[in-house]
């Protein structure tokens, strides 16, 4: 129950940030984020490193909003994105994959009325979230292998890289499927 309340609070908080229209309110949100980092003992250095990784996306969004709207609106969007990315980082560091999957299962309990099994949803969420770091590692290894062979990482060669990544992903999916079959999952 605690995880469900925390999850729903996170979703509502992150969504409400986009409805804030004043810089003073955004300052209050920033202070709330800092307070959350202190309360949950999230390291500031790691949060800054994470934000630096997301900076190209945020800057692209700012440029697009400068072109389509004005610089003040673009700045407001950038601040909101930084705050949402920060609170998302805090949530991801304070919750396990299993905890998120269990929370989503609990929130999907009303779907039993429609004959949907929440345990299946929990399993799908758990597998999906667990596979993300594996995909990231596979891509990194593939990128390093291409660089070692002298293959440039560009749009022209992306088709080959994505094809090899897709093949690797399919192998992983087959391994998971075989493991689930051996464990008897889904048998009635």
Image (cartoon, rainbow, N blue to C red):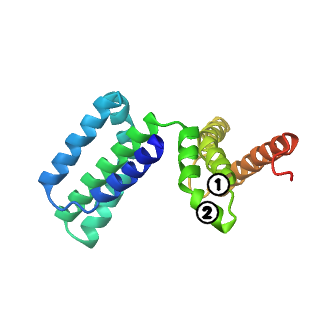
Looking at marks 2 and 1 on the same chain, the residue that comes earlier in the sequence is marked by 2
Mark 1 secondary-structure assignment: helix
User: What residue sits 28% from the left and 56% below the top?
Assistant: 17
Left or right: residue 155 compared with residue 70: right
Q: Position of residue 122 (x, y in %)?
A: 63, 49
Q: CA distance from mark 2 to mark 1?
A: 7 Å
Near mark 1 (Cα within 10 A), the count class, few <14, some 14-19 or many ≥20, is: many
Query: Which residue is farthest left?
Result: 24
Q: Name the spot of residue 44 as percent of width and height, x first.
A: 31, 30
135 vs 108: above or below: above
The reply to whether callout 2 and callout 1 are in contact (CB within 8 Å) is yes
What residue is disc 1 on? 118
Does dot 2 land on a helix, a strand or a loop?
Answer: helix
Say left or right for 154 vs 61.
right
Q: Quadrant of residue 94?
A: top left
Identify the residue position indicated by label 2 in the image: 111
**Residue 74 vertical placement versus 34 (above, below):** below
Question: In the image, what residue occupies the spot 41% across and 52% down?
Answer: 8
């Amino acid at each position: 129950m605690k995880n469900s309340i925390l999850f729903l609070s996170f979703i509502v908080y992150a969504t409400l940030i986009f409805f804030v229209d004043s810089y003073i309110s955004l300052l209050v949100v920033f202070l709330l984020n800092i307070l959350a980092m202190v309360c949950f003992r999230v390291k500031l250095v790691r949060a800054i490193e994470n934000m630096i990784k997301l900076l190209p996306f945020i800057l692209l969004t700012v440029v697009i909003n400068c072109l389509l709207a004005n610089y003040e609106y673009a700045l407001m969007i950038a601040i909101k994105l930084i705050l949402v990315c920060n609170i998302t980082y805090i949530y991801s560091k304070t919750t396990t994959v299993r905890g998120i999957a269990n929370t989503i299962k609990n929130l999907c309990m009303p779907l039993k009325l429609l004959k949907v099994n929440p345990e299946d949803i929990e399993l799908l969420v758990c597998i999906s979230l667990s596979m993300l770091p594996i995909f990231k590692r596979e891509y990194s290894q593939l990128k390093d292998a291409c660089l070692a062979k002298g293959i440039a990482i560009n749009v022209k060669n992306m088709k080959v890289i994505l094809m090899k990544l897709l093949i690797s992903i399919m192998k992983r999916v087959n391994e998971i499927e075989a493991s689930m079959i051996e464990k008897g999952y889904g048998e009635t």
